[in-house]
Image (cartoon, grey):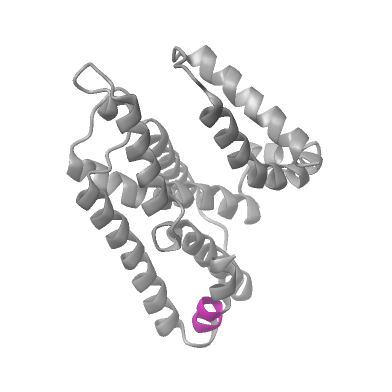
Amino acid sequence: MQFYIISPLLLISLWRWPKIGYSLMGLLFATSFTAYFVITYQYDYDVTPESIAAGGSINVQGMMDKFTDFTNKTYTKPYTRISPYLVGILLGYFLNKRKQNNSPKLNTVTLLLGWIVASSITLACIFGLYGRQQTLIEACFYNSLSRTCFACGVAWVVFVCVSGQGGVVNSILSWDVWIPLSRLTYCAYLVHPMVLQYVFLSMRRRFEYSNITMVCIACYFSICSSILKH
């Protein structure tokens, strides 16, 4: 909601005074990156499972306290989370400009290169940390850039689909069967943090981590969130 309130300032600036608009966007990107980087470095927020478990024994209480502190200082703060929203604003502006200028479609080489880069970036954001422990500097860069880079990958998919060059991806995403689900998921998204907190804070003992366990838990949370949103 905070981002929505300030978005007219950015959009009007981009429309009326592009240089000022781009400068504002660049300043916000830089501020968000710097804030996330400094906070991660200052408080040593390398909170991936591999890093937490490094050294053998796990201090569960210490791990939870650190993760809660990380959430409070970064995950819920607008100045660290605005970058993906800015990517969306730039995408909308760019699509509108292309429509006004009747820009031609991308050639095959550019399209292929875009898919390769976008896919590589988004997959790296999700799986890049698997099975390895980060250094603190790596954690600073990952925390500062991962969500922005993932948003750029999603923006590419939106761009090619809106431009009529999405191919099979556009056919799948435009399938009518997704329409009812798309109208249900946002409310579930708003409800699910309460479900997560209730379940995890109610636990009195540890459970054994496995892929099957996490899939079952994810399904449970999805179903409960969908039911409670009604």
Residue 53 in the image: state x and y as whole percent. 27, 23
Q: Which is more toward the observer, 168 or 55?
A: 55
What is the quadrant of residue 20 in the picture?
A: bottom left
What's the magenta bit mostly, secondary-structure-wise?
A: helix
Instruction: Determine the residue positioned at 53% across, 80% down.
Output: 9
Q: Residue at x 53, y 60 (%)?
A: 88
Question: Residue 161, image x and y in percent?
Answer: 63, 50
| Magenta stretch encompasses residue 160 | no
Say which residue appears at 45% left-offset and 39% top-offset.
119
In the displayed structure image, the side of residue 50 where residue 25 appears, left or right: right
Range drawn in magenta: 9-14
In the image, residue 12 sits, relative to residue 126, either above or below, namely below
In which quarter of the view is residue 131 placed? top left
Is there any visible trace of residue 127 in the rendered image?
Answer: yes
Q: Position of residue 29 (x, y in %)?
A: 37, 65
Q: How many marks?
A: 0
Q: Closest to the observer: 83 or 17? A: 83
In this rendering, the answer to whether 128 lies above or below 117 is: above
Task: Give the residue displayed 79% in from the left and 43% down from the top.
Answer: 179
Q: Position of residue 203 (x, y in %)?
A: 52, 23
Is residue 128 something that shows in the picture?
no
Of the 4 image quadrants, the one containing the N terminus is: bottom right
**Left or right of residue 209, residue 215 in this image:** right
Q: Is residue 42 above or below residue 215?
A: below
Left or right: 2 in relation to 49: right
In front here: 19 or 61? 61
- Quarter of the image with the C terminus is top right
